[in-house]
Every structure is written in C-alpha cells, then in structure tokens.
C-alpha cells in the first residue's frame, strides 16, 4: 500500500524530471565535440541515476571489498540485464563500452556518444581491435572504464568463458581489475534475452521485486599474473564462486 502511494505521488515527478533532463542533454549533444567534457560526463551519470529511479528500481551498492578501492580501475561485471547499462554508470565514474547499435538510438545514443562511450561492432574483428585500442588509450589517459567480459548478455548465469580484452588492457597498463557481481533478486524478469530494450525496461518497471545488489570485491592487480589467459581464467573462476553465493542461494 505504501509503495503504491509512493509510486502515485513520486514517480510522475521523477519521470517529468527525467524527460526534462533528457531534452537538455539531447540539445547539448548537438554542440561541437570540443564542448563535451567532464561536465557532460557528470550530467550523463546523473541522468542514469534518475533513469534507475524512474524504473522504480531499488539499486544498492554492497561493499564486499576489504581493501580501499584503487584511484583508477578497469571495472568488470557480469551482464544479465539491460539495467546495468544505466546502473553501473549511475554508481561508478566510468566510461563504458557498448555495442555499435546503441549509437543509433535517437536520444540514448546521442547522450551516450557525447558522454564518451566507446562502441564496438561485435561481429567485426577490425571494430573489436579498434575498440580495444580506444579503451586502452582511455585507461592510459587516466579514465576508468567498464567492460563486460562475457561479451554481451549471456543470461542470468555466468557464461562458460570470459573474453580476454579487459585483462589484456590491465596487463598493458598496470591498472587493476575491479570485479563487481550484479545480483537481480527477480532474475527471470531482469534477464535480457531477445526482447527489445523498451519492452525489457517496461518489464523491469513492473516487477514485484525490484531489489538489485551490485557487490564490489577487492581489486585484482595484474602484477600477480604472467599472461592474459591465466588472468582471465582466475577471475572467471571467482565469478563462478560468487555465483554460488549470490544466485544459487536465491
């Protein structure tokens, strides 16, 4: 009952603000690229926070790390849903990697492009190589980036293997991997399979269990690994263990 009253009173205001902010960011995105910068990146992250609120999602950041987080990191996470495209930048100061199709979305595409998103055509080896080079350059310039090593949405369970790109960049630059495990209590509703984005977000909005936990673990230093294959397998094994704790127990 209380949630219904809250939704009735608060959500219309949140959606009105989101629409207004979207218009502002869309207009700003038409300025020459030279006028983009940290201010727009900050605004786009704030937009993501409002979007998560508008979806009536209870997004929680849970610190499992025993050590302080590094000043710079390469964030990785599992990728079961569409929400993390908004949830991760809402909580972390990162520059994301996204599939090329996102660039063509009318509003979201322009906002993400102007905010510094790096795009990749997953079916193109040339595009994947260029994206990897751009991500490495972003890290070398002092930015945090996020990569989903499963290589896309592979379902609610951890995929059988991780792509090596994030770990290769970590070894090249010396910047640690920050592993975050994404837990959706209502796994079935949040899991993104073959639905369109709008339909999936609508399903998320309607869920009866909107609790989402993003578990942050200790950063992993590349100094402990001799090659990207060993590095990748080690972190993948950690995610399989965390899956037992965060998903199998539900």
Image: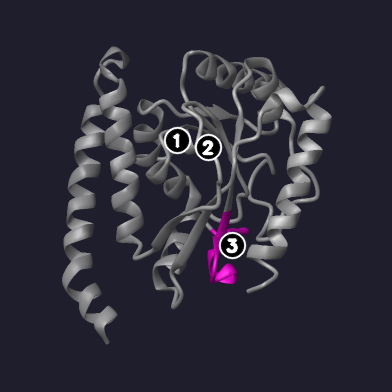
Q: Which mark is residue 101?
A: 2
Q: Secondary structure at mark 3?
A: loop
Q: Residue at x 54, y 40 (%)?
A: 67
Residue topped by disc 1: 104
Please say if the residues under marks 2 and 3 sit with CB atoms less than 8 Å apart. no
Q: CB under 8 Å between callouts 1 and 3? A: no
Question: Quick check: is 185 in the magenta stretch?
Answer: yes
Gap between marks 2 and 1 measured at Cα: 6 Å
Q: Which residues are magenta?
A: 182-195
Say if the magenta span includes residue 144: no
Q: Is residue 94 above or below residue 196?
A: above
The image quadrant of residue 116 is: top left
User: Residue tagged by mark 3?
Assistant: 191
- The C terminus - image quarter: bottom right
Quarter of image, res 113: top left
The answer to which of marks 1 and 3 sits earlier in the sequence is 1
**Spatial distance from mark 1 to mark 3, Cα to Cα?**
23 Å
> Which residue sits at x=73%, y=41%?
235
Q: Residue furthest bottom?
A: 1
Residue 74 in sight in this render? yes
Front residue of this view, candidates 234 and 44: 234
* Sequence-first tag of 2 and 3: 2
Q: Is residue 219 left or right of residue 16?
A: right
């Amino acid at each position: 009952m209380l949630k219904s009253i809250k939704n009735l009173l608060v959500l219309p205001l949140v959606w009105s603000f989101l629409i207004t902010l979207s218009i502002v960011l869309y207009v700003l995105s038409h300025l020459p690229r030279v006028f983009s910068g940290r201010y727009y990146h900050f605004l786009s992250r704030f937009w993501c926070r409002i979007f998560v609120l508008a979806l009536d999602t209870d997004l929680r950041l849970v610190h499992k790390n025993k050590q302080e987080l590094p000043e710079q990191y390469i964030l990785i996470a599992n990728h079961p849903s569409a929400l993390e495209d908004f949830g991760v930048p809402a909580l972390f100061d990162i520059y994301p990697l996204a599939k090329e199709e996102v660039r063509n979305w009318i509003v979201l595409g322009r906002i993400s492009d102007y905010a510094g998103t790096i795009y990749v055509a997953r079916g193109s080896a040339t595009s994947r190589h260029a994206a990897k080079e751009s991500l490495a350059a972003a890290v070398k310039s002092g930015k945090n980036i996020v990569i989903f090593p499963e290589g896309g949405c592979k379902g609610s369970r951890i995929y059988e293997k991780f792509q090596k790109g994030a770990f290769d960049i970590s070894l090249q630059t010396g910047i640690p991997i920050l592993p975050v495990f994404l837990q959706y209590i209502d796994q079935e509703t949040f899991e993104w399979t073959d639905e369109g984005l709008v339909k999936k977000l609508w399903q998320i909005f309607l869920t009866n269990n909107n609790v989402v936990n993003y578990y942050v673990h200790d950063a992993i230093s590349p100094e402990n690994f001799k090659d990207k294959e060993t590095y990748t397998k080690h972190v993948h094994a950690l995610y399989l263990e965390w899956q037992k704790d965060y998903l199998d127990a539900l």
